[in-house]
Image (cartoon, rainbow, N blue to C red):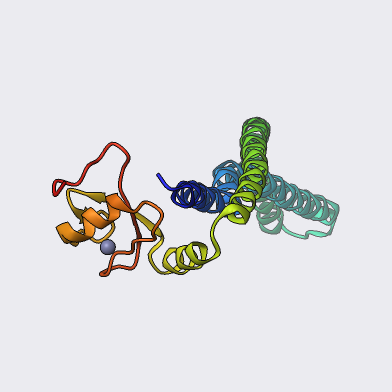
Amino acid sequence: MHRNLEILLEIQALELTLRELDVDIAALPKHLAIVEGRLQDAQQAVERAKAAEVAGQSERRQVDREIEALRAKVDKIRAHSGDVKTNQEYRALLDEIAFAEAQIAKHEERLLEIMESADALGRQVKEAEGALAAQRAEVAAEAGALKDSTGVKRTEREKLAANRQKLRSQADEMWLRRFDRVLRMRGQALAAIDREACSGCRVRQRPQFLQEMSGDPERLFVCESCGRILYLETDQVPSSQ
Ligand SMILES: [Zn+2]
């Protein structure tokens, strides 16, 4: 095979690998976002548990205030019990005290419930925080691995790009210009002859043309249909020969 073709084939292989590496490297932020997005559920669980705990604490303060107000009311009624003139008034006072005390008892029951559930809510917050911390560590490890592997790919990319530069400096100017133009247009600039056809666009090549190709490896042969630079696989002999 002609040296120019060998060089261009190597450059083309490098171009394909570089393209894949570029796609991988560019995808890092997206991959990191996906990995870090997995924390969302655990974060929300912590927020929900904390909100429930805060709601319990605020209800407890509310109930405490109500009990305090009722007790103050009972004290006030008792303080004024000397002012009553009739038995009827006195009974009404006692009724009022009994009613307030019944309300206090009901609030105290609720207070007990709140205090009992406060323990459970506190445990839930701790559990949710523990789960979040564990998941954070997992995500950090995975993000680190992603960054490391991207770093390796960047190094690999630099090495391959330097190789490409070296190869390009060895290639024939005219061949290289066509190579670049077709690569931009078609993604691949070289195409092997496969069963007498251009493997890039599948258009059959004339027997005369194939014969010329095998007889003149120094010449640049181009597919008239797609513009790709054509080459014969070394182990492949056109049937026209
Ligand atoms: Zn073609």
Q: Across the whole image, how many numbered discs are drawn on residues?
A: 0
* Quarter of image, ligand 1: bottom left
Query: Horizontal and vertical percent for residue 136?
Result: 66, 36
Viewed as shown, does residue 177 lie left or right of 227? Answer: right
Most foreground residue, 226 or 207: 207
Q: Position of residue 216 (x, y in %)?
A: 34, 54
Asked if residue 140 is positioned above or below residue 92 in the image, the reply reads: above
Quadrant including the N terminus: top left
Decide if residue 96 is in sight here. Answer: yes
Q: Nearer the viewer, residue 133 or 18?
A: 18
Quarter of the view holding residue 26 = bottom right
Residue 142, image quadrant: top right
Residue 128 at x, y percent in the picture: 62, 35
| Horizontal arrangement in the rendering, residue 2 relative to residue 149 (left or right) | left
Residue 63: where, in percent of width, then height? 69, 49
Q: Nearer the viewer, residue 30 or 113?
A: 30
Q: From what the image shows, is residue 23 above or below residue 225? A: above
- Name the outermost residue toward the front: 215
Name the residue rendered at 22%, 42% in the picture. Answer: 237
122 or 167, nearer to the observer = 167
Residue 46's quadrant in the figure?
Answer: top right
Residue at (63% x, 34% y) in the render: 145
Which residue is depicted at the point 56% across and 43% down?
35
Report if residue 108 is visible in the image: no
> Is 147 placed left or right of 27 in the picture?
right
